[in-house]
Image: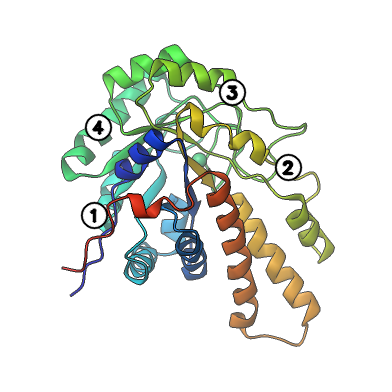
Amino acid sequence: MFVFMLVPGKLLLEHALANHYAVGAFNANNMEQVQAIMDAAAETQSPVFIQVSRGALKYSRMIYLRNIIQAAAEEHPEIPLVMHLDHGNSLETVKQAIALGFTSVMIDGSLDETGKIPLSFVDNIKVTKAVLDYARPLGVSVEAELGTLGGIEDGVGSGQVHVTDPAQVVEFIKQVPVDSLAIAIGTSHGAFKFKEKCTLALDVLKDIHQKVPNLPLVMHGSSSVPAELVAQVNKYGGKMPNARGVDIEQLKQTPQYGVTKINVDTDGRIAITAAIRKFLVEHPEKFDPREYMTPARDALKEVVKARMIAFGAAGQAKYLTPNPSPK
Ligand SMILES: [Zn+2]
């Protein structure tokens, strides 16, 4: 049997930190999404995280998605690929993911196990430490979260925003030296993030990076919700008024201050939906899923490619340890 290696997250993030770019982390739930993300990575020669939420694991019944991501590694052994658990809620969930072969896990100790109620700093440290103690000896990278993002996605989110306190970061990392840390500096999950134009708290980010310069930082909720895609959804029968995201020009400034991983989920969802809506309206006689999933996959690929280029990850694959040959 061929086993295609997935890379630990730490490897990519340390390279990104040293070279001032961010790796794109894209959520997937099915084959077409995994293919689109991988095609984008191959075409731009970018390292990449394919990340899977608890909702995605449930939807895909665990092993399906794992095997599809394995297939992506098999198809493109030249692309450093991380299979990452997004918003793990407990040690139990992390253990499941690691048993499935995930090479990176997030433990979101900013919220309780239901993913809705903020946890105290002390309880966050407690659950993060339990995960770190379990994952590190197995070579699996650990992402933690400090501060809470706005917005709710896949049932995760308290709906409240607490911008990360730089002084707390120092204390947190001292107690639990995780491989990367998700911080809250004004981004938010979902498509309806902001009433007004979003402004990231870059001053807070700078302060954090100055205090812990060797720590790879992560930004969640960083979809930009492109107006043209939202317009396409609405033109073909959708209803997404007032959808608004993070300005890409602001995101592009963050890797110089230690941001090494930028999570994008919503943009891909909108791209897929816009493409399917358009196709079905224009071809009411068609009913073969392949015919509308093909433009959907292409649309997602274009969004992912654009983000990889914007984050500076394009062309970086060759500098990382390539996927070892099949053993
Ligand atoms: Zn998130």
Q: Nearer the viewer's eye, disc 2 or disc 3?
A: 3
Q: Say whether disc 2 or disc 4 marks the residue closer to the N-terminus.
A: 4
Outermost residue to the top: 167
Q: Pointer 2: what residue?
A: 244
Q: Nearer the viewer's eye, disc 1 or disc 3?
A: 3
Give the class, few, some or many, for how many residues have Cα within 10 Å of label 3's Cα (few <14, many ≥20).
Answer: some
* Kind of residue at disc 4: Ala
Q: Residue at x 45, y 53 (%)?
A: 315
Q: Pointer 3: what residue?
A: 202
Outermost residue to the bottom: 285
Q: Nearer the viewer's eye, disc 4 or disc 3?
A: 3
State the image coordinates of residue 232 (x, y, percent, origin top left). Answer: 78, 61
| Numbered badge on residue 99 | 1
Q: Nearer the viewer's eye, disc 2 or disc 1?
A: 2
Q: Quadrant of the N terminus?
A: bottom left
Q: Residue at x 79, y 75 (%)?
A: 281
191 and 54: which is toward the camera: 191
Q: Quadrant of residue 180?
A: top left
User: Disc 1 on helix, strand or loop?
Assistant: helix
Measured in 3D between alpha carbons, the distance from the residue under mark 2 to the one under mark 1, in whole angstroms, is 37 Å
Q: Say whether disc 2 or disc 3 marks the residue closer to the N-terminus.
A: 3
| Numbered badge on residue 130 | 4
Q: Say whether disc 4 or disc 3 marks the residue closer to the N-terminus.
A: 4
Outermost residue to the right: 235
State the image coordinates of residue 185 (x, y, percent, origin top left). Answer: 56, 26
User: Disc 4 on helix, strand or loop?
Assistant: helix
Q: Say whether disc 2 or disc 1 marks the residue closer to the N-terminus.
A: 1
Residue 259 vertical position relative to residue 78 in the rendered view, above or below: above
Residue 117 visible in rendering: no
Measured in 3D between alpha carbons, the distance from the residue under mark 2 to the one under mark 4, in whole angstroms, is 37 Å
Q: Say whether disc 1 or disc 3 marks the residue closer to the N-terminus.
A: 1
